[in-house]
Structure formats: C-alpha cells, structure tokens
Amino acid sequence: MTNEVAQTKGNYLTDLQKLDGATLRSFVDPKHQASPQELQTLLAIVKNRNLNPFTREVYFIKYGNNPAQIVVSKDAFMKRAEQNPNYDGFESGVIYEDEKGELKNKKGIILPKGAKLIGGWCEVYRKDRTRPIYREVELSAYNTGKNWWQKAPGQMIEKVAIVAAVRDTFSEDVGGLYTSDEMEQAAPVDVTPTESRDDVVARKMAQIEQFNKEQAHTDPEPTQNEEPIQGELLDGELEY
C-alpha cells in the first residue's frame, strides 16, 4: 500500500498531466478559499503551460471574497525563455531623469548621483528575428511603496521590465501570464466585513449621542420643531 501511495505521488510530481484538482487544492489552497472555477483555471494553466505549483512557479493570490489572482514567478518566465531554441539573451536596466531633467537609460540599477528613478527597460533577443523586442515600464504604474518596492525600487522595476519583454517575445510560452510584482499594485482591497450589523448600529448610535450632546452644548435651547438628527447618520452603513 505504501508503495502504491509513493508511486501515485511520484506520478504527478514528475508528470503534471497526472495532477488532479483535489491534490492541487490541498497544496495551493488548503483553506478552500478559491472557487471550483478558479481552481480549474489554475489546473488548466498548470497542465497547458507545464508550470509546477510545487516549486512555486505558479500560485494563487486571494483577498477575502474577491476573485483569486493566478500569478507566475519571474524564474518561470526565464526558464520558459531559456527552453526556447530561439532565445538569444537579454539586456536590461533602469530609466532615470538626470539633474537637467533629461531621461536616460542605463544598464543595471545603480543610479548616478542626483538622478531620479523613472522606470525600467529590457531588450530580449531571438535568433529568428532581426530586431530585439524592447519594452519600457514606468515606476509610478507599479510602485506600491511597500516591502521591496520601498527598499529596492530599481531592482523591482527592472524585474517588471524583464518579464514584460520576455512575455511579448515568447508569447507562445508565457503569453497572458503575470507575476506578483505586476499584479500587486492592482491587488483588490479585502472588503470582507469586519463588523456585524449590531456592531455598526452600536457604533453609529454612540456617534449620534455624541452629536446630540455637542448640539445641546452649542445650542442649549432648541426650538420645539427641532429633532435630534439620527436617521441620516445610519443611512448607507448597514447595507452590506
């Protein structure tokens, strides 16, 4: 029995075409947050593009009730490019604005003194084409200001440029796939409610009480027609 289990595991670890949805979910989505449709989409990408979820070549990003995002690692992009017989290398770097306000390209990510980082660039070469594929990406379109984007923005935006150029150069291998660095700035906000309806009512009633106290302090003798404002402070907050 042990040998049968080991053989079964070995099958899908060495042949992704034998991977099933239940096994994939247990590895990438043990909390069952993704829908069956999202899981099937990931399984199709795994098999059609031969991307290995067990080595983190492809995985889910899931925020609350929002649709899952399927992302691919930069290493997977480069691996697919290098496996293509027409791959002939690449060059990359950053785009910066110098002290005179002129835009310049340079290889690598270390900027001259006084320069302002603007974006990244990459050229990918194919043996069967006379011209390289060149792509530029703008820092402001991807920079989240968090984590490595804050620590090493040049390194991050160069990575995005490399992936964009590789994707367009080898669309037959990695077309339509994106990395987490590209998707992070578009990550949806988790809108899963953190308060119950009763919590919202209690919070708003406390605000109403505080509002009425402030009104009484500023206008101690309201006219008979004046009513404490209540309903409008609750409107629109309890519908979710």
Image (cartoon, helix red, strand yellow):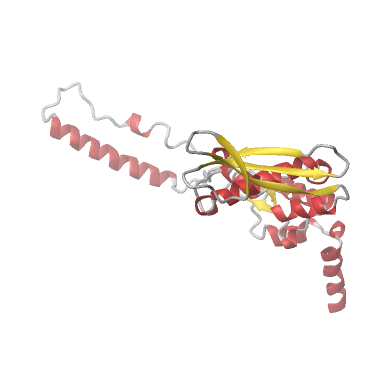
Tell which residue pokes out farthest to the bottom in this image.
2
The residue at the point 39 percent across, 47 percent down is 199
The residue at the point 24 percent across, 30 percent down is 228
Please state which of residues 223 and 118 is positioned toward the viewer in this rendering. Answer: 118
- Rendered image quadrant of residue 182: top right
Please state which of residues 21 and 109 is positioned toward the viewer in this rendering. Answer: 109
Residue 76 in view = yes
Residue 58 in view = no
Left or right of 139 on screen, residue 49: right
The residue at the point 71 percent across, 59 percent down is 56
* Image coordinates for residue 108, horizontal then vertical, percent: 62, 50
- Rendered image quadrant of residue 132: top right
30 is higher (above) or lower (below) than 45? below
* Image coordinates for residue 221, horizontal then vertical, percent: 11, 27
* Image coordinates for residue 222, horizontal then vertical, percent: 14, 26
Left or right of 70 on screen, residue 202: left
* Image coordinates for residue 73, horizontal then vertical, percent: 70, 53
The residue at the point 28 percent across, 37 percent down is 208
